[in-house]
Amino acid sequence: MEFYFAPMEGVSGYVYRKAHHEFFPHMDKYFIPFFVPKENSRFSQKEKAELSRENNADTCTVPQLLANKAQPFIRMARELQEMGYEEINLNLGCPSGTVVSKKKGAGFLGETDELDAFLDCIFRELDMKISIKTRVGMNSPQEFARLLEIYNQYPVSELIIHPRVREDYYKKPLHMECFALALKESKIPVCYNGDLFTEADYHAFAEKFPRAGRVMLGRGMITNPALAEAIKLGKRIDRDTFRRFHDRLYEDHRRVLYGEKNVLFHMKELWFYMACMFSDYPKYLKKICKAQSLAKYEDAVNVLFYEQEFLPTVGYCPPEKRG
């Protein structure tokens, strides 16, 4: 089984990826949160830092693009190729309202003729690996058969499937029958993505789909950064390692980001997931999120580590299930 780290906007940037790879060097691929190609514009300094080979050394890293126009996509893909990237990933999964309203991300899935024409153009023009991360439809899982038919026409290097439609966002049940259909009929190597938060979740999935050879982990990995290690090697993270990993992220964000406010924002985003690794965490998470200075933040984190039990097998808990 190969394990991929999902692109998570505002969470899994290069600071996170570098630290994660040094502490837990068992991910097969990292995906960079999406870039939006624009007409006649190049990468910003922030985007260049995210993409620089120095900041992505020693990892298999794949940039993700969010687009519905072929020429801007092709231009940016060629820029990435010049930087040394051998693969890019097309985002057809983002369910955000602002993205979907522009018929990008999951919104592009509802425009099958345009999507077909887009894919035809980019695969004719580009000589590099292009993978696709997709949902199974815009409004209904019944749309997936047609989408798979379209994907199968092209030399897609990999099809990463999140088996929800756009309207499901991340809350409603997964349409596993669509993933089963892909395993059976896809001409493209298939990767699964969706709600694998714990070792138990993974093993239940692997038992049901023994032919699956790739999985992408997102929220489960941000919660438990050693989740892939635990599955692959049976090596579970301990409190001390988790603390050292946190401290590395904290210091690196302080070094890279300007101002306490930006550091606090990034660390609070991480704690939305990581807090689930502790017993009775909700009230402690509230204190972390209310911290308005680094000193208050450090105090709140120290109290959580000191007072609560560390639970390495629990994993991510969706907000609607939290106490």
Image (tube, rainbow, N blue to C red):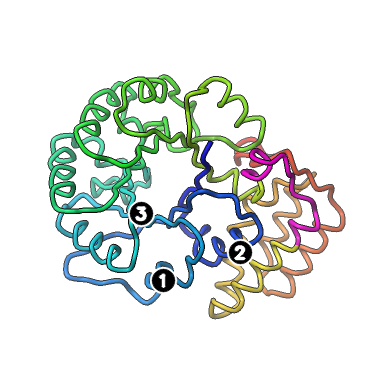
Q: CA distance from mark 3 to mark 2?
A: 20 Å
| Three-letter amino acid code of the residue under disc 3 | Gln
Marks 3 and 1, the one that precedes in the sequence = 1
Q: Nearer the viewer, residue 49 or 124?
A: 124
Taking the view exactly as shown, the residue that stands out farthest to the right is 307
Residue 219: x and y in percent read 56, 45
Determine the secondary structure under disc 1: loop
Residue type for callout 2: Ala
The image quadrant of residue 317 is: top right
State the residue in front, 177 or 170.
Answer: 177
- Name which residue lies at 29% across and 49% down: 129
Q: What residue is at 36 percent from the left and 34 percent from the top?
A: 189
Amino acid type at image mark 1: Ser
Residue placed most toward the observer, 60 or 167: 60
For the residues marked 3 and 1, what is the alpha-carbon distance in whole angstroms?
A: 14 Å
Please tell me in which quadrant of the rendered image residue 263 appears: bottom right
Stretch of the chain drawn in magenta: 227-243
Residue on which the image places disc 1: 52
State which mark lies toward you, 3 or 1: 1
Q: Main secondary structure of the magenta part?
A: helix
Find disc 3 in the rendering and name its residue. 64
Disc with the residue nearer the chain's start (2 vs 1): 2
